[in-house]
């Protein structure tokens, strides 16, 4: 989804940012990254697609630019006191690397849920690592408290003018290549890299459009544009942890309002598809946040032809455990896999007859659940080469009088149902209504036990499915038996817990296969 930005003058002017970019000091730790022409993507999207390869930086992310520029501009007395930062990974490595290069003491606060891969990468640079909290915001509060108590310099991940300028050297390099692009796409977390690139490119290549790209479950810039001011998101998705920020920066928002043409939101599935695209053209496995800009570019390119488009490939610090999920979801993100719920007669030969509807299309999964003496339901995954082919299959199903639903975009179908088809026991208490909720759990020891302790003993859990996505949080589907007469008590109880619940009791996937 694309949102336009009404450009307005800012207090932290782009002109000031440009001056800082021209004097930025980044190449003691960073390289001038190449721009790669993406042959496969260009052919598929019918546009000339380029990738700015920040995944090739020494820390596999652009974050070394801003961190080093900020720290190298500290006064001698500030450097003597040492630095501290909060990060789930890439900024932490950038700060630790800069501190080691400049021989400054460094402390990094990381969430307790941070992957071991990223913790080890930070320690490799000699930084002291403090694990605190379950998410970035809790780590951030702890880091700021330590900065005050120990009189250390806090190094912001995105909202400091020197950090913005360091990231902005990417824009300067793009223009130094003497290529003119119709549009440039930049990932958005707190907005630092977008603000820096946009400030420079909008000044020296005003015909080039600049778009920020956000994940739809952490779209803090989109919300800021909608309300005309910075707002704090109530909940932030964690799959693309590199951009999981609840509020866009103050300085970054000022520059973005002045220089950026729009912001595009994408889904996690579209991210996974973009990771696959980058791999197919570069043989590099991007982290989800690293493929964010390309996911937005693909949305944009679907409506045009013959343009020259560039996306920032911003990082390759991917958790190995996450790869299976990325592979699974990339087919859906590319709109190549469809998930259908189909009702068939409960009699011999029904499966064979149904399968003949799919022809030579590849069946990725086939789940069966008896409904009653007359009918059964199947959950079918189908891999297709085009939307037209899917329409053909739907037409054939209608022609043969099959009742079916497209569950491809149904969240509990994607994340849970295909792994747990099985109905409710007839022995279940009929005096109680089963209510279904989804939420996120932290991936850490005793996470389930801590949840059950907080949940208490007043309600019975009738269904539970936990799925670890190789990230700091896992998706959970939970069924709770509740009195049919009133929902108030359970609603209040769930609201008081330290988890965000979304009710899915009316979800057709649940009602068809799990009820």
Image (cartoon, rainbow, N blue to C red):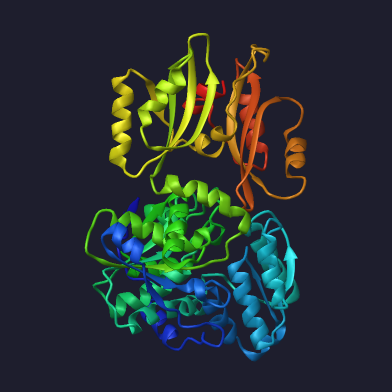
- Relative depth, front residue between 14 and 292: 292
The residue sitting at the bottom extreme is 76
Q: Is residue 433 above or below residue 208?
A: above
Residue 180 placement, left or right of 479? left
Q: Is residue 150 above or below residue 145?
A: below
Q: Position of residue 79 (x, y in %)?
A: 66, 86
Give the position of the C terminus as an image quadrant: top right
> Residue placed at 72% from the left, 34% from the top?
455
Q: Quadrant of residue 393?
A: top left
The residue sitting at the top extreme is 373
Figure label count: 0
- Relative depth, front residue between 447 and 80: 447
Q: Is residue 167 above or below residue 234?
A: below
> Residue placed at 39% from the left, 74% from the top?
197
Q: Is residue 188 in view from this perspective? A: no
Residue 307 placement, left or right of 416? left
Q: Position of residue 58 (x, y in %)?
A: 57, 78
Q: Position of residue 68 (x, y in %)?
A: 57, 81
- Relative depth, front residue between 153 and 461: 461
Residue 150 placement, left or right of 398? right
> Residue placed at 68% from the left, 59% from the top?
111
Q: Is residue 94 in view from this perspective? A: yes
Q: Position of residue 201 (x, y in %)?
A: 33, 76
């Amino acid at each position: 989804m694309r949102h336009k930005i009404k450009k307005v003058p800012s207090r932290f002017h782009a002109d000031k940012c440009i001056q800082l970019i021209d004097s930025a000091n980044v190449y003691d730790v960073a390289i001038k990254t190449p721009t790669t022409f993406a042959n496969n993507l260009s052919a598929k999207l019918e546009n000339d697609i380029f990738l700015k390869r920040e995944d090739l930086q020494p820390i596999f992310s652009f974050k070394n630019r801003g961190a080093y520029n900020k720290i190298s501009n500290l006064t001698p007395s500030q450097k003597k006191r040492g630095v501290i930062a909060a990060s789930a990974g890439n900024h932490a490595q950038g700060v630790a690397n800069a501190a080691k290069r400049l021989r400054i003491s460094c402390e990094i606060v990381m969430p307790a849920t941070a992957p071991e891969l990223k913790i080890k990468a930070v320690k490799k640079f000699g930084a002291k690592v403090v694990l605190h909290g379950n998410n970035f915001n809790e780590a951030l509060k702890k880091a700021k408290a330590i900065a005050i108590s120990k009189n250390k310099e806090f190094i912001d991940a995105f909202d400091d003018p020197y950090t913005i300028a360091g990231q902005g050297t990417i824009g300067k390099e793009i223009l130094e290549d003497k290529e003119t692009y119709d549009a440039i796409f930049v990932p958005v977390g707190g907005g630092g890299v977008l603000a820096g690139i946009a400030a420079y490119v909008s000044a020296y290549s005003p015909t080039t459009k600049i778009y920020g790209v956000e994940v739809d479950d952490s779209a803090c810039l989109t919300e800021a544009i909608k309300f005309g001011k910075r707002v704090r998101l109530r909940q932030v998705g964690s799959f693309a942890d590199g951009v999981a920020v609840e509020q866009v920066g103050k300085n970054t928002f000022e520059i973005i309002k002045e220089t950026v043409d729009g912001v595009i939101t994408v889904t996690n599935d579209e991210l996974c598809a973009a990771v696959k695209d980058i791999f197919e053209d570069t043989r590099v496995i991007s982290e989800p946040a690293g493929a964010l800009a390309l996911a937005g570019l693909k949305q944009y390119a679907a409506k045009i032809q013959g343009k020259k488009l560039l996306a920032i490939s911003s990082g390759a610090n991917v958790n190995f455990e996450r790869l299976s999920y990325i592979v699974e979801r990339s087919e859906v993100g590319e709109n190549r896999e469809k998930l259908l719920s189909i009702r068939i007669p409960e009699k011999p030969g029904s499966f064979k007859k149904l399968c003949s509807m799919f022809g030579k299309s590849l069946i990725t999964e086939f789940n069966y659940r008896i409904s009653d003496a007359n009918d059964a339901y199947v959950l079918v995954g189908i891999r297709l080469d085009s939307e037209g082919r899917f329409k053909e299959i739907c037409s054939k199903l209608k022609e043969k009088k099959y009742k079916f639903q497209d569950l491809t975009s149904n969240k509990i179908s994607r994340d849970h149902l295909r792994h747990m088809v099985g109905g409710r026991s007839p022995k279940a208490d009929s005096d109680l209504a089963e209510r279904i909720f989804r939420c996120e759990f932290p991936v850490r020891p005793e996470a389930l036990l801590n949840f059950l302790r907080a949940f208490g003993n007043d309600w019975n859990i009738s269904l539970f499915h936990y799925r670890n996505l190789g990230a700091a949080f896992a998706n959970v589907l939970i069924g709770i038996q509740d009195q049919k007469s009133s929902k108030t008590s359970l609603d209040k109880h769930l609201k008081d817990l330290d988890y965000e619940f979304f009710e899915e009791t009316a979800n057709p996937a649940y009602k068809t296969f799990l009820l």
